[in-house]
Amino acid sequence: MGRYLTLYEPAAANAFHAAGLWRDETHYDLLTQHATERPEAFALRDRARRLSYRDLKEWVDTVAGELHTADLRRGERVSLWMSNRVETVVAYLACARDGYACNPSLHRNYTTGEIGSPRSWASNRLHPRRKNPWIS
């Protein structure tokens, strides 16, 4: 895993864990719990669709499988150039499942010219320009 610019402080994290404010669960773990306990309950929606926890988890697992076939390793970066829609959440949760570092906000941080520059993608293993069958 590479080094990241971060405000993470291990002592503060340990204190939050000791106080019961933080747990070791990922967002994917929480999705799995909800999909088991309330599979038909409303989980996520945007203008185009509304997903139950079961449907969301199935889609996330499909995308995670696609990411796995791209030979990604835990801790590697996956950057997304997507708007605020369910596909962005699905991709984020798929990254969480297998421990990939997800950067979901390229559309807010870069100009089109910067996004198109190969240098801007040098540290990412998966590029959003690649055609992916899981993005509708």
Image: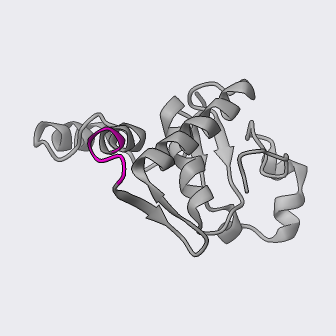
| Residue placed most toward the observer, 66 or 119 | 66
**Residue 64 in the figure: left or right of residue 19:** right
Q: Which residue is at a point 63% across and 24% down the rendered structure image?
A: 73
Q: Residue furthest left?
A: 19
Q: Is residue 120 visible?
A: yes
Location of residue 74 in the rendering, given as x and y in whole percent from the top left corner:
57, 26
The image quadrant of residue 16 is top left
Q: Is residue 4 visible?
A: no
Location of residue 84 in the rendering, given as x and y in whole percent from the top left corner:
59, 69
Q: Quadrant of the C terminus?
A: bottom right
Location of residue 20 in the rendering, given as x and y in whole percent from the top left corner:
13, 42
Bounds of the magenta span?
Answer: 35-40
Q: Which residue is at a point 10% across and 43% down the rendered structure image?
A: 19
Location of residue 30 in the rendering, given as x and y in whole percent from the top left corner:
33, 42
Q: Is residue 112 above or below residue 134?
A: below
| Residue placed most toward the observer, 44 or 80 | 44
Residue 39 in magenta stretch: yes
